[in-house]
């Protein structure tokens, strides 16, 4: 093997590394499985090209050569199918039409395998490292270009249509990927087949094109969250609402805009929102100064104003806070076009009845928007898998509780627990069973807690429990009850004859002694407490797991 042989191998290893990276860094959904299957197919080309140079037997070389071109047919069909689903043309996959899509690729694959009279490829110098291509090779290239051309046409149509920005973002990434790969494939054919120079062939061009196209996919998965089901569902929900919705963070930066608002407002995600500047572009019968003062100085209050803008439209602007424990983390601003209401006001009494019905409809819509806002608030403080509080909520709650407990000398305890050998469960039964086990464990723990106790997911398979007004003795009893309840909890695993149970390791921290100096920095003091209970949990693991290690301060 010469040095050139290792170029395709290196590109294969890079593709494999990206495959592992995507697999390890995302929550695997059905869409991710489809992509990983497609990615796996694209890895075959460079490894087959390496194998051709790595072996000396012409028959084996021919086998890998045929396998690589069959894989290229699969990639071309995969691109087209992926494009059809991505651009919303699934109707093309009806039974008769879908068969027609596969016929050219299937015929090409048969020709590649048969290689009749060497019309696809012939060896030169006694091996297939040096080879000449025949008529069937050019037929194969024509078919592949046809598949790619159809894919590019469908994506171009999608980019010029009125599809959602989310869809267009994904289509742009795929368009870039397939274009880059096509360019490198054509360069490979031009330099290594058409020119047929006496110099050594330039290896790795097609493999490099495949690698670059995969990089575009990985960027789309991580930066644009192209396959993130939660984000897609959330965006689709707010896009169905016919009122404009603007979501801001606590720094007044735009983090979400729905489709109904985009044609009417010159804002983009990431830009800074200026309410005063927006109101200066119109006039209102209400007190604009009072509205701005409430908006700027009392962000936790809901407020609204009706504006008439220079284009003649009447818009009802409503603001609602997104808060956690009375601390604002963002806002939802809704824009309701009420121009039609003003037109109806100047019509006959008969039309006034229609106005009343429309007004009732707007009230219902506002209730729906309020419900959506409450759901957003709940999503901000709860864990998506288990439904219990998340780490952010509990740490904010504990910081306030610590201040109160120190002031009034009230003892309290904190339990930090971890599921033993959880990685083994994931590896042995899969992540879905792992998620079911986490949910089952949370249900078991909740059965043992008092109404005043607060359970939250600390991260992964770790959970934290705040026990207010609880001394060491009572905390130990509660911790023992939690441990035994979880250990006796059995979960039925599908397609398995045995039920599944787990144990937990527990770190328990009880606070009896208080110093007023801790009030100077409650956040720092809380971090020290969490570090202490974390060390207790670590010690419980070191001592063999399935045990409780208590610390008293």
Image (cartoon, rainbow, N blue to C red):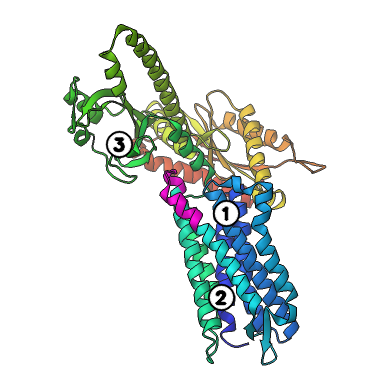
Q: Position of residue 405 (x, y in %)?
A: 42, 29
Which of the marked residues, 1 or 3, is nearer the chain's N terminus?
A: 1
Q: What stretch is highlighted in magenta?
A: 153-167
Q: Position of residue 124 (x, y in %)?
A: 66, 89
Q: Is residue 385 shown above or below 209?
A: above
Q: Is residue 353 shown above or below 455?
A: above
Disc 1 marks which residue?
82
From where the camera sits, is residue 173 visible? yes
Quadrant in which residue 193 is drawn? bottom right
In percent of the image, x 42 and y 18: which residue is there? 364
From where the camera sits, is residue 248 visible? no
Which of the marked residues, 1 or 2, is nearer the chain's N terminus?
A: 2
Per the image, label 1 sits on a secondary structure element best described as: helix
Per the image, label 2 sits on a secondary structure element best described as: helix
Disc 2 marks which residue?
10
Disc 3 marks which residue?
264
Q: Position of residue 105 (x, y in %)?
A: 66, 64
Per the image, label 3 sits on a secondary structure element best described as: helix
97 or 50: nearer the viewer: 97
Which of the marked residues, 3 or 2, is nearer the chain's N terminus?
A: 2
State whether the magenta stretch is mostly helix, strand or loop.
Answer: helix
In percent of the image, x 34 and y 8: which residue is there? 350
Q: Which residue lies furthest to the top in this view?
A: 349
Residue 123 numbered mark, or none: none
């Amino acid at each position: 093997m010469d040095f050139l042989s290792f170029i395709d191998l290196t590109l294969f290893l890079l593709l494999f590394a990206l495959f592992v990276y995507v697999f390890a860094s995302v929550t695997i959904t059905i869409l991710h499985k489809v992509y990983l299957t497609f990615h796996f197919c694209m890895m075959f080309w460079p490894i087959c090209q390496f194998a051709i140079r790595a072996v000396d037997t012409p028959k084996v070389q021919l086998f890998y050569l045929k396998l690589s071109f069959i894989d290229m047919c699969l990639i071309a069909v995969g691109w087209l199918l992926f494009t059809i689903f991505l651009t919303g043309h699934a109707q093309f996959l009806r039974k008769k039409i879908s068969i027609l899509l596969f016929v050219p690729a299937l015929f090409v694959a048969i020709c590649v395998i048969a290689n009749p009279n060497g019309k696809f490829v012939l060896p030169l110098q006694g091996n297939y490292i040096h080879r000449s291509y025949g008529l069937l090779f050019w037929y194969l290239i024509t078919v592949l270009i046809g598949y790619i051309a159809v894919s590019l046409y469908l994506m171009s149509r999608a980019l010029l249509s009125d599809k959602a920005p989310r869809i267009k973002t994904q289509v742009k990434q795929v368009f870039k990927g397939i274009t880059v790969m096509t360019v490198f494939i054509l360069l490979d054919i031009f330099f290594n087949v058409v020119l047929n120079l006496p110099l050594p062939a330039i290896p790795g061009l097609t493999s490099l094109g495949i690698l670059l196209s995969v990089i575009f996919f990985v960027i789309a998965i991580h930066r644009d969250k192209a396959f993130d089901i939660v984000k897609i569902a959330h965006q689709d929900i707010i896009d169905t609402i016919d009122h404009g919705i603007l979501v801001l963070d606590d720094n007044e930066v735009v983090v979400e805009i729905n489709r109904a608002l985009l044609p009417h407002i010159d804002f983009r995600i990431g830009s800074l929102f200026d309410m005063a500047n927006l109101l200066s572009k119109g006039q209102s019968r209400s007190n604009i100064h009072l509205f701005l003062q409430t908006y700027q100085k009392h962000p936790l209050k809901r407020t609204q104003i009706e504006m008439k803008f220079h284009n003649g439209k009447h818009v009802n602007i409503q603001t609602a806070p997104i808060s956690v424990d009375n601390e604002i983390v963002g806002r939802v601003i809704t824009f309701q076009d009420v121009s039609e209401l003003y037109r109806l006001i100047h019509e006959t009494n008969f039309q006034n009845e229609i106005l009343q019905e429309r007004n009732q409809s707007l009230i219902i819509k506002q209730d729906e928007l309020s419900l959506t806002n409450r759901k957003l608030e709940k999503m901000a403080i709860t864990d998506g898998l288990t439904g219990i509080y998340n780490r952010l909520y509990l740490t904010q709650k504990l910081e306030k509780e610590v201040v109160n407990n120190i002031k009034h000398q009230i003892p309290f305890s904190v339990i930090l627990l971890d599921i033993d050998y959880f990685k083994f469960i994931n590896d042995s039964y899969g992540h879905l069973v792992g998620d079911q086990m986490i949910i089952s464990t949370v249900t078991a723990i909740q059965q043992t807690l008092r109404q005043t106790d607060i359970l939250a997911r600390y991260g992964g398979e770790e959970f934290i429990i705040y026990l207010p007004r609880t001394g060491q003795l009572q905390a130990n009893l509660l911790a023992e009850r939690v441990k035994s309840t979880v250990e006796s909890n059995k979960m039925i695993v599908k397609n398995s004859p045995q039920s599944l149970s787990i144990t937990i390791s527990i770190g328990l921290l009880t606070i009896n002694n208080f110093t007023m100096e801790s009030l100077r920095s409650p956040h720092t003091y809380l971090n020290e407490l969490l570090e202490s209970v974390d060390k207790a949990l670590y010690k419980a693991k070191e001592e063999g797991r399935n045990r409780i290690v208590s610390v008293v301060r």
